[in-house]
Image: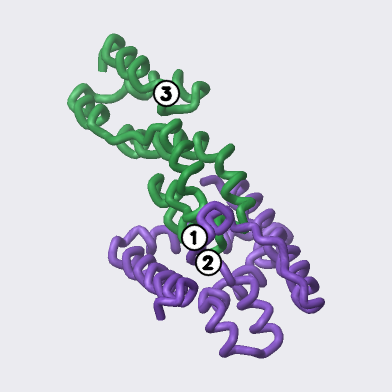
Amino acid sequence: MDAQKADMFIMTHSKFFEPHLLPAIREKLLQTDDSKFMMIQSITYREPVLMLIISILGGHFGIDRFIIGDMGLGVAKLLTCGGLGIWTIVDWFLIMERTKEVNFEKLRLLLA
Amino acid sequence: MTRKNLYFLALFLGLAGQIWIVYSYKKLERQEEAFNTCIFRRVTGLPCPSCGTVHSIVSIVHGNFRQALNENPLGYLGFPIVLIIPWWILADLAFGRESFYNFYLRSNKFLNHRWVLFSILSVIFLLWLFKLGHFLHWI
């Protein structure tokens, strides 16, 4: 993939990933075949800020965990009243980082 | 989620759960009402799907199995989970194994099947409706 496309991807998608991973993602993109570009662009990445809002509003029922794909933790959170309310609050601080992690895992699967 | 993060989160929550149950147990034995942590109940005044789990666990400990079922059937699921998980993680950490992490990965994969997740959520939702009906004197 040429540098222009890789830079464009990084610029438009930087909010979905951890900042320290961006250089590694760019390197990987440069090594990837051009034919994968459309697929990479068409993945639905989860918006970290939106997940934080969902976590504040519906975190008590584990909805945030269900949406990002942590089904096991989602069910556990639902069954324990949001971890007695403690986990709900802990997740307000963890969910953005976890969303970025999940986004990176999705991209890594495609780039592998 | 990395193994370290999962173990830290599960251990913290498991131990907090155990301490909370012991605290509630002592409160309920003295016929006092334990502090209610449910945000949903505080905001809406209605019970959430897992409200009553601690009461249910205390009833199970006392041997009142029928009362536990009335308070919240999810107590039967929550009790063994809260009891086992912290010790499972501590054993894993002590012996350098990854059995809990593997269990987490397997259960996540299993729950990713739509029909499994849908049936579990449906059961929880039906139990909640029943509880709400009881609470609002519909039933």
Image vertical order of residue B42 relative to residue B116, above or below: above
Residue at 61 percent across and 75 percent down: it is B80
The label on residue A78 is 1
> Callout 3, which amino acid?
Lys
Q: Are marks 1 and 2 in contact (CB under 8 Å)?
A: yes
Secondary structure found at label 2 = loop
Mark pair 1, 2: CA separation? 7 Å
Q: Are labels 1 and 2 on one chain?
A: no
Colour theme = by chain
Taking the image as shown, residue A75 lies to the left or right of residue B120, namely: right
> Callout 1, which amino acid?
Leu
Chain in purple colour = B
Task: Examine the rendering and report whether any part of residue B102 can be seen.
Answer: no
Would you name the residue on which mark 3 appears?
A15
Colour given to chain A in the rendered image: green
Would you name the residue on which mark 2 appears?
B50
